[in-house]
Amino acid sequence: MKIDVEHVARLARLGLSDEEKKLYGEQLSRILEYAETLNRLKAEGIEPTTHSLSMKNIFREDKVIPCSDIDSIIANAPREESGMFVVPRIME
Amino acid sequence: MNSSTAHELHTRLRNKEISSVEITEAVFRRIESVEDKIKSYVTLNKEFALAAAREADKKLKSGENIGPLTGIPIAIKDNMCTKGILTTCSSKILANFLPPYNATVVEKLKEAGAVAIGKTNLDEFAMGSSTENSGFHTTRNPWNIETVPGGSSGGSAAAVAAGECILALGSDTGGSIRQPASFCGVVGLKPTYGRVSRYGLVAFASSLDQIGPITKDVTDAAILMNVIAGYDPSDSTSADLPIPDYKKALVADAKRFRIGLISDLMGVGIDENVKKAIKDAARLFEKLGAIVEEVPLPTFEYAVPTYYIIAPAEASSNLARYDGVKYGHRSKEAPDLLSMYYNTRREGFGPEVKRRIMLGTYALSAGYYDAYYLKALKVRTLIKQDFEKAFKRFDVLISPTAPSVAFKIGEKTADPLSMYLSDIATIPVNLAGLPAISIPCGFANGLPIGLQIIGEAFAEEKLFQIAYTYEQNTDWHKRKPSFAKASEGKPKL
């Protein structure tokens, strides 16, 4: 099985070295071939299970509650300025 | 003292024979003498722990608000948020992360007066079966330090087995509590999905993750469940159901219990010694008055490929948040936004995490979604139905927890698929959202074997009763790693 590793890595926003691209290409092919054993099972008409408990939307009251203190959140930022996250320029 | 159970120490604390500070100091002495060999922990916080112990001693003295965990040292897997204490998921991308809040389980432990002593090692983001995928170091199995402790909660299981804590919390997505408990000869329970709040548990695969106890015996597991179980409005998937007193389920009686031995987990690929130990356990249950019959669960052979589509798919989505913007590592090579994403994630994630992000992204990508992801979700339904059928005839199902005893460090790292197959017996349980416990049931080559007992959703009490009955009639759980004797020169506690 051939996988477009570069395309997948781009979708995942994951930088990979040439070595990694080769390795993951091979390993993913093997794992996906193994996953194809699932095709031996007939599953037409079977409902998919996304969640083991059957749950519908859970609602809560729209009430204001205090959130964690902002300083300790901002303290984790790789770069910050006046309580804001700083990122590289997005628009030229 | 450090090798005692929580319920033994609770009695001695109540009788004022010892103090929480003394227990906590004994645990830290033990850590100082063995940790360089076992490497269970990522972060230790002695001062913080001693402060909590002094607080507990005050309560114990006044006799107010005392519970079974008051003053008891507990270790926490490093993927549960602890306010102001590093929470790394054993990943370089979170190496400096200081959570601004506590996970609900951590908050509950605090309210119960437990003494949190440190954060234990895991496979990076809980992806793995040996702790070899940790971004920091590999934990060793206290029974033989050449072998892995299992994973991903390997640090917690090793710490409990080596007496580096009294009990611990782990998390289980495909076997990450039960398999290390099996490898380290301790008790590990994965509760029903929704029984314990996941709020503050760093997400790996949200439809499968569940927090649970890793302890020295079944009684301690019930005690810890009494503290951590329950509805939490902060976790929309937590179940709003009444919680029984699990200690009341600790009754040594297996009479007329209908036990199904899963025949599909007793065949090819399962070590002969392991099969023998499980058959011996089945015979013991019969002797104790239970009815044991074999039960086929034919879809089980599809559980591992199903899991390795669903779990990476969910992970690839959950781990999108590590982008270098709000917390965690950010690459120094970030001239523009896209390079910041690419380089941050390339530098911050280890090989297994990258592999699973790639696998999950592929399975969810246009053109492949139906063939892989949707197909896996349908097979998940079939696996669930297999269990439902079995539970019409049986109260609980039993099987080996793992196909073998602990394997050698490095043995499976070159072949991801062989590593994935070590979770063959535990994965179906997560896919169906059921509770299951692993308890020690024998030894092979000096390494522990685990018996897995699986129950219906929210039927943890039955697991506790059967596990307790087995434990009362055997003494596997009383054996300690010979490694423990290595420090006998130190003062006895």
Image (cartoon, coloured by chain):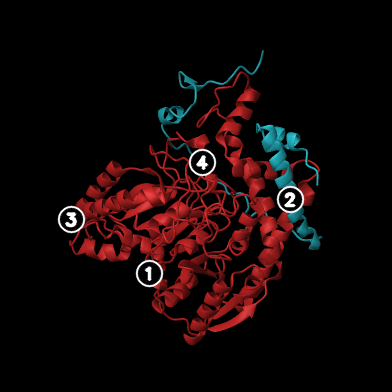
Chain colours: A cyan, B red
Q: CA distance from mark 2 to mark 3?
A: 61 Å
Q: Position of residue B118 (x, y in %)?
A: 37, 46
Between B160 and A26, the one lying in front of the other is: A26
Residue identifier under label 1: B479
| Tags 4 and 1 on a common chain | yes
| Tags 4 and 3 on a common chain | yes
The residue located at (38%, 69%) in the rendering is B479
Of tags 3 and 1, which is closer to the observer?
Answer: 1
Label total for image: 4
Query: The numbered mark 4 sits on a residue in which chain?
Result: B
Dot 4 or dot 3: first in sequence order is: 3
Q: Which numbered tag is attached to residue A30?
A: 2
Label 3 sits on what residue type? Lys
Is residue B189 among what the camera can see? no
Residue identifier under label 3: B61
Task: Classify residue A33 as left or right of residue B460.
Answer: right
